[in-house]
Every structure is written in C-alpha cells, then in structure tokens.
Image (cartoon, helix red, strand yellow):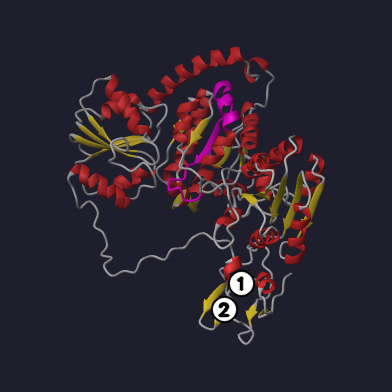
C-alpha cells in the first residue's frame, strides 16, 4: 500500500517493515513523530513506549536486542547525551537482535540547545552510522541498518536531520507488519555482563569488525557516484546530497559523490571516487566529518587533491544548508554562477519576526507571574529548564536566569543557593521533565540541605514536543489506562517537607503560596497544576469595557499575552486567541476586563 508520510513516518514504517518487536524513546523535536507513527500501526507482538528518558529507552531496547528481537530507539541529538552511558557500554557488549538508535540532528538549531553531530558519536563509540538524504531513502536505509546490526552484532546509529524528518513523501509499505521471530534471552554472563577484561577483548574485536564494515560499506547502495567525471568533484552527505543533486541536475559533467554511511568510512569507495580528481568540495551539515575523513585518506595515500569545505571556510560551520546556499557554494567552486535561478523579490516586504511565545491562556504564564509578584523587591534567582516554560525568559515576564539542559534548573538552583544564602533561589521544571531528569536533582537537594523553592509547572502533558504521555498522565503509549504517578507524593517520599499544589490561574492563592514558601528554609515545592491550553481549551472569552479602560496597558506590560492588543482607544482582546483564562482581568487595576469563564 502507498502511504504519504512525513520523514519520521517513513523511518517508523521502515522499522516496522524490518520486523521490530519493541520501540522505545523519549520525545524531542525533530524525532517525536517516529514513536507516534509506530503506535498507529499496532500488531501482535509489538511493544511501544515513551520511556521516562533516553537512557531508560535505550536500556529497555538493549534487553530486547539481547533476546534476539529487533528493537528501535528514538531521540533527538541532545537525548543521545543522556543515552550515552548505556550506548558506550553496548558498543563493547554488542547485541544479538538488531538494535537501531535514531538520533535526529537539528541544524540551525531550530528547536535545540546545540548543533551537535551524531556522526561524531558514531566515531566516538566506534559503531556504524547511516545518514539518509530523503524520507524515501530513510525508509529503505533503516531496514538495512537493522540487517547490519544483526550481521555484526552491534548497535547502529541512524542520523536523520530536521529537513529529512519533516519532509513528506509517498512510501510503498507492506499491507501487514509482524515482528521477526526471536530466540529469547539465553543466560550467558560471559557475554552480557560487562567487565574490564571483556571490554579489553571486545575493543579489539570492534576495531577489526569496523574494518570489515568499511569494506562492505564501500559496495553499499547508499554510497554512489553520479556524473561523467571531471577534475572537480562534489562530496555530499545527508540532506546536503539532495540539495547538491538539485543544483547539479543540469550539469551531468560534474562528479557528485554521495556518502550515506559516514562511519566506518568507506575508504575503498572514496578512493575510487577520487580517481583523477584534483579538487573536492564537501557539502555536509554541522561538523566537517566527511571532510576530515577525506583529508585523512588523501594524506595516507598521498593524493594530489585539494579538499575544501568547512575547514577552509568554503561552507559555514553553523546552521542548515539549503538549495540556495548550496547553489552559491557550488557555483563558486565550479565557476557556474547560475546554478539556481532565484525568484525576483524586488519590492517584497520583509518577513515578519515571530519570536516564540507562550500560548494565550497558557497556565505557565500565570505561574511565572505569580512568582514574580510574590518576590518583587527581593533578591531572587530563577533557574529555568527545557520545555515550554523556557519561554518564561521573554519580556515582559523575564523570569528565566539560567537554562542549560533538562533537569539542570533544579541542580543549578542548588549551586546558586549555596553561594548566595541571602537570595531566594527558584527552580522551574515541567511535569514531563520532572520524571525524565528532575527527581535525582530533588534527591540531591534534600540530601545536601539546599535552600531552594521548586516550582513544578504541571500541565498534564509533554507539551512542547507534541503532547506525548508521561508517567504523570493516565494513559501510556500502548493506549492502556494506568495509574498516574503523583508528583506531590514523589516529592514527599523523597523528603520534601512542604509541598503545595495550587492552580496558577487562581492568582491570589498562587501568590500567597509563593510567599508562604519564601518564608521558610530548606527544600520546599509548589506544584502549579493546570492543564495545557492546547489540550483542554476552556470556554468563554474575556472582553474589555472601553468605558472603564484607562489605557494604562498594565495587562500588556506585565504578562504579554498574545491575545492582548494595544489600540488607540486602549486595549482590546483578540477573540480568536483568547481562551478566557481571566489572568488579565485579575491584573487590571480598574476592573475593565471581564466576561471570563474558566472551566
């Protein structure tokens, strides 16, 4: 059957076609839709889950692979850092069933803290990596990745980038899916229990195996040469190959070399592709991985070839590539300035600037505002975290002083508190992030007698990545009803003595809760609990009475809700955006805003 799917959907369908028995992961853009697609095709023998974090996801999948089953793990590139502990050990231990780890890279970055390159992890771990250039290729390539994983008994990395993940294509898929039969786990401590001596032996095996894989990769169908040949060649990988191919479609005389398997590097293939070539331009996103491999190869074999790319400034190190950027780079390299005919944009208006902002009616806005009001005039630090609540940094809220990585808000608040005993130190964390990486930070705070106020912004979902379930919700990814894990009970079990739960949209009560906690010492917590406005939209709208409005614009200046609009007559509320949360009505000093109905 034909399916018109996003690239992430193609990856999921390819994994299902490969016969996976287990799929696990942690949501993170640009990878989130892979697990969601797998869950839309349920069949007997398949287990699918959103794990509590990437480390847990990989360890669950590793046990499945030890049993001989095929397993898929998904995450974004930042999540690979979390999963790196088991990944490094797995590289040595190996697997029995196919284990493919999808780590979606985010050039730009569009929705990430960093632009790190998963191919570097492959070289670091000494395991193979596949680099798809399109959704169609991703569907085929991930099936081969499972084959390689089983053949060489190694975990395999799969590295799509944002534009591959989010592009669309028609894919021909089987009418039915079924997991591959598997033997089951067989006890063998000498194989599955990692010890220094075992790691020493396996390290040598890994390096020898990688030489074999490199030779096999040299004949792999995802490494290709197009064009009749010339003294100049273009090497490209990932989506940059698609861009280069588009630029060179009318120039068959240009040699275009695709590297679909960057590690172990297919040296024999590359040597053949470099035959007769005097100059090379390397197009790739993020780090100069292929470029460095070519430089090493040219040096080892004393090839008289000039290799250009990121290292000599021909290609930018940061950000995404595009057809337009590739055309400019290749046009200059090949002395073909008109590789791409640009549209005439003379007189076109500049695109509007759309900074990210909390949704109208988002309860996080009320939570931040309550804290801000409660501690006004006092010395305070606000440690943020990864999620929608990162947007609390924007004006006029201005309530995020630090944001490093998931869970770090809790531990960084502790560091500030130990060095600034005269300050109130707040740690903000979301409900999903609390389960993913926040609980250990709270344990650390209690054990080390930190003086912090933990603010859990509980909107009952994993909002920023697409509203996935988590342990605090009442249903898991298999669709089964489950008992939610109660955050307040977890905190009390850890040893937090004061735990308050409050609706942030009840502004006066929320402010009072913060003031109560500010008077005490030690670890205390406020759970600001109100559902995500995108999932549980209340009825009713707020309106402004123009006869009462004094045009002070306090509502706009203090909370910055996108539904509030300054006008000549004062302030008006966009009914298409307003959710009737009523926060602005509680702020208005003259009672000019009303009509709210919050349910």
Q: Nearer the viewer, residue 237 or 553?
A: 553
- Residue 139, placed above or below residue 60: below
Q: Residue at x 41, y 46 (%)?
A: 134
Q: Please report the bounds of the magenta region as a residue range.
A: 84-111
Q: In the drawing, does residue 332 fall left or right of residue 438?
A: left
Instruction: Residue 53: name its quadrant.
Output: top right
Q: In the drawing, does residue 346 fall left or right of residue 408?
A: left
* Magenta stretch holds residue 383: no
Look at the numbered discs 2 and 1 and tell me whether their residues touch, using CB distance below 8 Å. Answer: yes
Q: Residue at x 20, y 25 (%)?
A: 304
Lower position in the chain sequence, tag 2 or tag 1: 1
Q: Nearer the viewer, residue 558 or 491?
A: 558
Residue 255 place in picture, x, y as percent: 23, 38
Q: Residue at x 47, y 34 (%)?
A: 144
Would residue 162 be visible to someone looking at this image?
yes
Residue 423 place in picture, x, y as percent: 67, 48
Residue 485 place in picture, x, y as percent: 77, 47
Q: Residues within 10 Å of mark 1 (few under 14, many from 20)?
A: many
Q: Which mark is residue 91?
A: none
What residue is pinned by disc 1? 555
What residue is pinned by disc 2? 571
Q: In the drawing, does residue 227 fall left or right of residue 492?
A: left
Q: Nearer the viewer, residue 472 or 14?
A: 472
What is the secondary structure assignment of the residue under circle 1?
helix
Quadrant occupied by the C terminus: bottom right
Instruction: Residue 357: name its quadrant.
Output: bottom right
What is the secondary structure assignment of the residue under circle 2?
strand
Mark 2 and mark 1: Cα distance apart in space: 9 Å
* Magenta stretch holds residue 106: yes
Q: Residue at x 69, y 61 (%)?
A: 370
């Amino acid at each position: 059957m034909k399916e018109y799917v996003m690239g992430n959907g193609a990856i999921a369908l390819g994994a299902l076609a490969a016969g996976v028995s287990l799929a696990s992961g942690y949501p993170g853009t640009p990878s989130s839709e892979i697990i969601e697609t797998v869950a839309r095709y349920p069949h007997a023998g398949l287990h699918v889950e959103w794990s509590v974090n990437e480390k847990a996801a990989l360890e669950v999948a590793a046990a499945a692979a030890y049993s001989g089953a095929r397993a898929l793990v998904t995450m974004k590139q930042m999540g690979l850092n979390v999963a790196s502990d088991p990944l490094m050990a797995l590289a040595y231990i190996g697997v029995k069933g196919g284990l493919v780890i999808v780590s979606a890279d985010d050039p730009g970055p569009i929705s990430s803290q960093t632009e790190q390159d998963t191919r570097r992890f492959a070289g670091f771990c000494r395991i193979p990596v596949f680099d798809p250039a399109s959704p169609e290729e991703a569907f085929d390539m991930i099936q081969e990745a499972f084959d390689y994983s089983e053949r060489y008994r190694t975990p395999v990395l799969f590295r799509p980038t944002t534009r591959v993940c989010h592009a669309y294509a028609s894919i021909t898929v089987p009418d039915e899916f079924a997991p591959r039969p598997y033997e089951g786990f067989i006890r063998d401590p000498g194989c599955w229990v990692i010890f220094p001596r075992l790691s020493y032996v396996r390290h040598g095996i890994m390096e020898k195996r990688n030489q074999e894989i490199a030779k096999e990769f040299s004949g792999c169908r995802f490494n290709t040469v197009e064009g009749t040949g010339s003294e100049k060649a273009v090497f490209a990988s990932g989506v940059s190959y698609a861009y280069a191919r588009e630029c060179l479609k009318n120039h068959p005389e240009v040699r275009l070399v695709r590297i679909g398997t960057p590690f172990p590097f297919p040296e024999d293939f590359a040597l053949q592709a470099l035959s007769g070539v005097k100059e090379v331009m390397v197009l790739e996103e993020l780090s100069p991985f292929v470029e460095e491999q070519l430089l090493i190869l040219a040096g080892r074999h004393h090839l008289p070839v000039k290799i250009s790319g990121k290292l000599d400034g021909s290609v930018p190190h940061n950000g995404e590539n595009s057809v337009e950027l590739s055309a400019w780079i290749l046009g200059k390299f090949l002395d073909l300035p008109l590789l791409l005919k640009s549209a005439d944009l003379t007189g076109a208006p500049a695109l509007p600037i759309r900074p990210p902002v909390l949704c109208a009616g988002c309860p996080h806005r009320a939570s931040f505002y309550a804290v801000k009001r409660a501690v006004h005039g006092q010395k305070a630090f606000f440690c943020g975290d990864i999620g929608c609540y990162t947007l609390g940094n924007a004006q006029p809220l201005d309530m995020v002083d630090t944001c490093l990585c998931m869970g770090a808000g809790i531990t960084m608040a502790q560091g500030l508190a130990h060095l600034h005993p005269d300050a109130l130190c707040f740690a903000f964390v979301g409900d999903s992030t609390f389960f993913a990486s926040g609980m250990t930070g709270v344990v650390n705070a209690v054990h080390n007698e930190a003086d912090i106020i933990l603010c859990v912004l509980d909107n009952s979902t994993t909002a920023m990545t697409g509203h996935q379930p988590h342990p605090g919700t009442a249903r898991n990814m298999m669709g089964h009803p489950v008992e939610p894990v109660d955050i307040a009970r977890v905190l009390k079990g850890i040893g937090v003595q004061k735990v308050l739960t409050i609706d942030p949209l009840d502004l006066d009560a929320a402010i009072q809760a913060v003031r109560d906690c500010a008077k005490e010492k030690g670890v205390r917590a406020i759970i600001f609990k109100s559902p995500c406005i995108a999932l549980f939209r209340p009825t009713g709208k707020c309106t402004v009475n123009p006869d009462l409005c004094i045009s002070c614009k306090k509502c706009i200046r203090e909370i910055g809700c996108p539904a509030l609009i300054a006008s000549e007559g004062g302030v008006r509320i966009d009914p298409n955006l307003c959710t009737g949360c009523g926060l602005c009505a509680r702020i208005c000093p003259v009672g000019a805003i009303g009509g709210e109905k919050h349910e």
